[in-house]
Amino acid sequence: MDINSTLGIFLLILALSLTLGAVSAEEVEIDDNQELLSIDSQEDSIALAESNIPTEDDYSADVGVEVTKVSETEDSSRWLIFAYNNGTDIAVNAWVTIKLSDNLRYYDSYAFTGEFDSEYGIWYIGDLDSSDSTGLFINVMPIASGQQYYYIGAEIMSETFDPDLSNNNVLIEWGSKNGTSGNDTGNHSQSDSSAKAISQSLPAAGNPVAVALFAVLTLIGIGGKRKKL
């Protein structure tokens, strides 16, 4: 084999090597770009998933209570304890603690949900679904006649996280207080030991149909088991 043939074969091998090297480098660059695109896509998916993770507030109850007088006679009055849940989550094991002034005597009740323990003044509602409401009727009578100061207090709680406790307490006052006569039967929320006036209307997010039903059933005289506090 002469020198020219040998040189030609060498140049051919060199050209093939350079061509294969260029193709290999292009493949590596494509693979790297695909990997980068894959990583970016994964990061976008993770960010989207994290943005859709519900926060603590997305799973919370917002229980509230209202107390309204629905009927009255000379020696007794009937009251509606109206409990509701405006939250997005179920209020697990909800209960309402009811407190009467010492000069009021409880003698009758009817619970639409759960059971009322008249010995301790606790209405055990149970689970209260989101946007649901229920009621308890209680009948009370004054122990002594004459102008006196009376009150009915109610506090609702549950085992579910509740970020807003402003509607969990209500205090109804009427009669004479500190020697001044009056007839205050408005709803008052309690904050620690103080009482602050709030609206006398039922909660805007409550169920007006349920409240109307409660009132109608009261007028036709629904009774319950009679117990003494």
Image: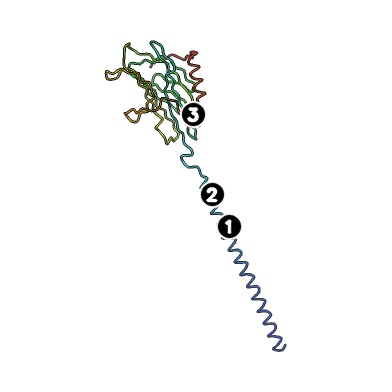
Counting residues from the N terminus, which is met first, the one under dot 2 or under dot 1? 1
Quadrant of image for the N terminus: bottom right
- Mark 1, other Cα within 10 Å: few <14 / some 14–19 / many ≥20: few
Side (left or right) of 192 relative to 52: left
| Closer to the camera in the image, 218 or 114 | 218
Counting residues from the N terminus, which is met first, the one under dot 1 or under dot 3? 1
Report which residue position mark 3 lands on. 128
Marks 1 and 3, how far apart at CA: 46 Å
Q: Position of residue 104 (x, y in %)?
A: 35, 16
- Residue lying farthest to the right in this orientation: 1
Type of the residue with mark 3: Leu
Marks 3 and 2, how far apart at CA: 33 Å
Side (left or right) of 44 relative to 103: right
Residue 42 vertical position relative to residue 194 in the rendered view, above or below: below
Marks 2 and 1, how far apart at CA: 15 Å
Type of the residue with mark 1: Ser
Classify mark 2: helix, strand or loop.
Answer: helix
Report which residue position mark 2 lands on. 48
Report which residue position mark 1 lands on. 38
